[in-house]
Amino acid sequence: MSKFSGVDYFNIDGLLSEEEILIRETVRDFVESEIIPIIEEYARKGEFPMHLVGKMAELGLFGANLPSEYGGSDMNNVAYGLVMQELERGDSGIRSFVSVQSALVMYPIFTFGSKEQKRYWLPRLAKGEKIGCFGLTEPDYGSNPGGMVTKAEKTEGGYILNGAKMWITNGTIADVAVVWAKLDGRVKGFLVEKGMKGFTAPEMKGKHSLRASVTSELVFDNVFVPESNLLPNSDGLKSPLMCLNQARYGIAWGVVGSMMACYHSSLTYAQSRVQFGKPIAGFQMTQQKLVYMVTEITKSQLMNLQLGRLKDSGQLRFQQVSMAKRNNCDIALDIARVAREIHGANGILDEYPVMRHAANLESVKTYEGTHEMHTLIVGEDITGLPAFN
């Protein structure tokens, strides 16, 4: 397959700064040289490529849009989005790792943590010396996180934590878990560290999706968490939802990378695959599919760019993030399926990235808020009437 050079039908690069383009190209080259050659093997094995952690830290990809004072890269949010886009072109699991480390671990510590917590954890997380995870979803509470049953009880010198979390990216390999639990009925954040007595994080096996990603349970059996590990500025369900909004923003950008990968593979394949005496790219129905892909990619790119500009100017509303996450995930999965059609039987082989992206996107469409939940968030915003039960 020909080298990837980007998908930019509307000259969107003309709307980007030189710095934003340089950051994107740096990560694009990294994906091309370090991720694409090895990702199918790791997906086949069902393992995360841990050797990439240090390399991604060197590029400044962890907490990239946080201040350099704490190890971040001071990137604006458009550049951060472009990083997510390029990583997911490699694989959703790689982007998920960076997204969790940045938006769901470093962001809550930066936003809700004490000065001591920020000074200790953020530089170590930025350097990849420590790995984090985010514990909100429970076995019986996904779309309704407010129903969580994980509880913290005050005790001398700290808190006793009991409960369980599920579908936790990076859980088994994490050094610290940002865990949300009810303290006197009010949601609070706690930093639960690997090795704390009663804390276990078994890996979930048997996945057909996100195979190059570690997915875990978190189990808390009378875990003592010292007072210094409470996130002091966390208060109520709004706190973890603020974190999810950061992650959803990254996903909206990320899935455009998977769209690009599927489109690029489809275009290259269609131009070289000869049937009935000519390349299948010369047939009307194939061209219709390719045009659909590039049109939807362009629309998503423009939506993301404005989303990023709104975020950088402090005007972003969470409902706008919901619209972008909802639309782009849905379209990305559809594009992956259309790409498989263009590849024919070859589309199921891991010689091509299409089936892996399609399987990954089944998860990405669901996590950080399902398609239906984001529909209702936008629906309430435009009608003023909540339709949640």
Image (cartoon, helix red, strand yellow):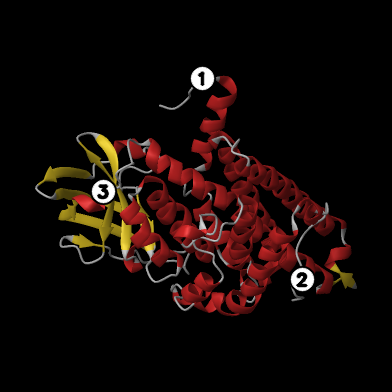
Query: In front here: 226 or 352?
Result: 226
> Left or right: 322 with respect to 143?
right
Q: Which residue is mark 1?
A: 385
Measure how far apart labels 3 and 2 are at the Cα level. Answer: 53 Å
* 238 shown above or below 126: above
Contact between marks 1 and 3 (CB within 8 A): the answer is no
Q: Amino acid at mark 1?
A: Leu
Q: Quadrant of the N terminus?
A: bottom right
Contact between marks 2 and 1 (CB within 8 A): the answer is no
Q: Amino acid at mark 3?
A: Leu
Measure how far apart labels 2 and 1 are at the Cα level. Answer: 47 Å
Q: Which residue is mark 2?
A: 269
- Mark seen at residue 230: 3
Query: In front here: 253 or 205?
Result: 253
Q: Quadrant of the C terminus?
A: top left
The answer to which image quadrant residue 40 occupies is bottom right
